[in-house]
Image (spheres, rainbow, N blue to C red):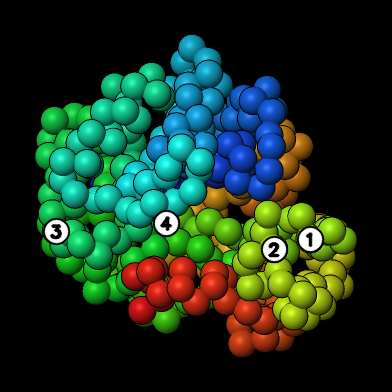
Amino acid sequence: MEMRRLGTNGPLVPEIGLGCSAMSGTYGPARDADGIATIRAALDAGLTLIDTADFYGTGHNEWLIRQALRPGDRDNAVLSVKFGGLRGPDGNWTGFDARPAHVKSALAYSLQRLGTDHIDIYRPARLDPEVPIEETIGAIAEMVQAGYVRSIGLSEVGAHTIRRAHAVHPISDLQIEYSLFSRGIEVGILDTCRELGIGVTAYGVLSHGLLTGTYQPAADGSDPRSHLPRFDQGNVAANLALVDKLRDIADSHTVTVAQLAIAWVLAQGRKHGDVAALIGARRPQRITEALPAAELILNEQDLAAIEQAVPASAVSGGRYAAPQLAQLDSER
């Protein structure tokens, strides 16, 4: 598997990493045993980039990763942690906090739950509108100097914020949703990252399951993704029709639609060596299913065919509802 250097002096990671949120209830109940087995399967397969957040399962996900790491695993694992999301006892979101004091407090709790003395990449999950990004990054930079953090990342921010943050301390990577269905990064943000030598870790590469080629809407409307515009009744059929257009291309390469969609994201960074894809999983077989995507090298003809099948303008519905999109600095 090809490797990616995140930032000029950031960690070296495989081009496919593991996103762990689904192990802590993002898409419904999950078994701890499955999550532990998935993390270990990823590490055994060389997927050493492990992405989490302190608010995934209100700390549960970090605790789960600690249980999964076997003796010797921590030396190989690159732990990427987001912070700042606030939740109440009922699990509902209550806001976001990226104040310097909270940076240090959140980091202390994450280190304890993960059972480690440092975090490889630490990042605010969103831009706090009440706190200048310079103050947040400055506080993390102090933790870098103290040895508790190795690199600083960002998540879901726009080009202007990236520049302001990078001026305070070198940024290793931007974590942002990037898939055939979510291509907003291509308008200014990706060019800014490349200009500054900042890597990209793409999440949502399968668009929350739409691009797996196997998604079927729940007849009773119980799917936890039903609140996302692309999954509502007015849009999901049109989006699945786009997915169907990818099947012939996938079949021609003897891969699944999901593997083709992952390979497309990887192809966006192959020339510059700067894009890694996070694969969300809660069972080990998802790791096995994702690996062939790294072996699929798409040529210009393939990419043109994919673009013709799924042009960015053809996707129905935004990735989040309008009020949520308004809170994303990356969408402004």
Tell me the CA gap for discs 1 and 3.
Answer: 43 Å
Instruction: Name the residue rendered at 74%, 55% in the picture.
Output: 223
Q: Mark 1 points at which residue?
A: 221
Q: Can residue 154 be seen in this view?
A: yes
Mark 2 vs 1, N-terminal side:
1
CB atoms of marks 2 and 1 within 8 Å: yes
How far is disc 3 from disc 4 in space, using C-alphas?
A: 18 Å
Q: Nearer the viewer, mark 1 or mark 3?
A: 1
Label 4: which residue?
175
**Which is more N-terminal, label 2 or label 3?**
3
Q: Nearer the viewer, residue 38 or 262?
A: 38
Mark 3 and mark 4 in contact? Answer it, CB < 8 Å. Answer: no
Mark 4 is on which residue type?
Gln
In the picture of the structure, the residue carrying the numbered disc 3 is 134
Position in image of residue 196 (x %, y %): 25, 66
Disc 4 from disc 2: Cα separation: 24 Å
**167 and 209: which is toward the camera:** 209
The residue that mark 2 highlights is: 226
Please tell me how crowded label 4 is: few (under 14), some (14-19), or many (20+) other residues with Cα within 10 Å.
many
The mark nearer the N terminus, 4 or 2, is: 4
In the image as oriented, which residue stretches furthest toward the top? Answer: 71
Which mark lies nearer to you, 3 or 4? 3
The amino acid type of the residue labelled 3 equals Glu
Q: Earlier in the sequence, mark 4 or mark 1?
A: 4
